[in-house]
Amino acid sequence: MTEKIGFIGLGTMGKWMALNMLKAGFPMRVYDINPAPVRFLAGQGAEAAKSPADVAAGVDWLFMSLPDTELVERVVFGENGVALGAKPGLILVDLSTISYIPTLEINRRLKEKGILFADAPVSGMEARAKEAKITVMFGGDEGLFQKVRPALDAIGNQIVYMGEVGSGQLTKLINQLLFNISCAGLAEVLPMAVKLGLDPEKVAQVVTTGTGRSFAADFFIPLTLENRFDEGYPVKSAYKDMISAAEISAHKSIPLPVVNATAVTFQMAISEGYGEMSKGGLIRVFERLLGTEFRKKKEAK
């Protein structure tokens, strides 16, 4: 493999995606504001860069995995950004989850500089990133998709070409909205079950095996029973999906009543101090309102 890959954003997901590309045999050049994952990957054979511009200047393909739209825009167009160091023909693939409308604008600006852009957000938590079993939703030129496919195959086991630029972010948003709705539904209904006298563990047994089953239920209910809200993406960070949905709803005149109700639950959780908890922590809003908790019964001593 002769293509040299750059990777910017070595957080919870990015570190493992970069490592798996490195293991697949791609020469790697990496950057993050946190030096720890840079040192980790340098120890595995990657080359450390000094800035996003420095990464872009020395690679053929560049991947990014960053927390939000604002940071992506700053890393690409800001001081010492990718656009400053990139040569025409650079392929830039954004693995971040950001808003759809800004994605189109990023593509427009990069096209003017001769930089080839694609959005390819991923789905799957840290464990799947480690195992190279995430889902990748690619939006961009199909020829470009086929060209970088070997790198994508190194990080995921479900690589789906969705269409033109922006299609990846739209698909990820659809997936996330359905997940968020499920999380908000659990948060609202499970405390009601306890308030009305049902046993939380028995309710959990039914919900995780019956028609009310969902990925959200399977993942969060066991953790909630154990009073654990530390696994999974924080509510405050995940709220960006609700903002993106509201932007699209307003621009395209698409009514989203259930999505809007879910956004209110997220807002309540953040305003009440639960924003750093996982989405399972949404339940704390309704537990407080009803004066109850969906937890395992404490064993008598």
Image (cartoon, grey):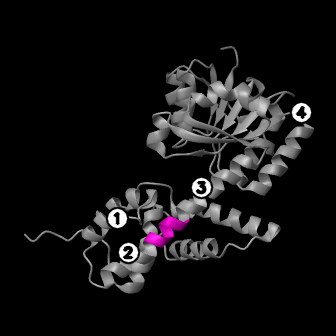
- Identify the residue shown where x is 79% and y is 54%: 102
Marked residue nearer the N-terminal end (4 or 3): 4
Q: Residue at x 40, y 56 (%)?
A: 219
**Residue 272 image position (x, y, % from top left):** 49, 77
The image quarter containing residue 251 is bottom right
| Contact check, label 2 and label 1, Cβ < 8 Å | yes
* Labels 2 and 1: the sequence-earlier one: 2
In primary-sequence order, the first of circles 4 and 1 is 4
Which residue is label 2 attached to? 190
Which residue is tagged 3? 175
| Amino acid at the residue labelled 4 | Gly
Q: Which of marks 3 and 2 is nearer the N terminus?
A: 3
Q: Which amino acid does label 3 sit on?
A: Asn
Callout in the foreground (4, 3)? 3
Q: Are marks 4 and 1 in contact (CB under 8 Å)?
A: no
Quarter of the image with the N terminus in it: top right
Residue receiving disc 4: 114
For marks 2 and 4, give the one nearer the viewer. Answer: 2
Task: Tell me the distance, in whole angstroms, between the alpha carbons under discs 1 and 3.
Answer: 22 Å
State the CA–CA distance, disc 2 to disc 1. 10 Å
Image mark for residue 250: none
Q: Main secondary structure of the magenta part?
A: helix
- Vertically, is 297 above or below 215? below
Query: Circle 1 sits on which residue?
Result: 224
Structural crowding at the residue carrying mark 4, measured as other residues with C-alpha within 10 Å and reported as few (<14), some (14–19) or many (≥20): some
Is disc 2 surrounded by few (<14), some (14 to 19) or many (20+) residues within 10 Å?
Answer: many
Looking at the rendering, the stretch of residues picked out in magenta corresponds to 181-186
Under circle 2, the secondary element is: helix
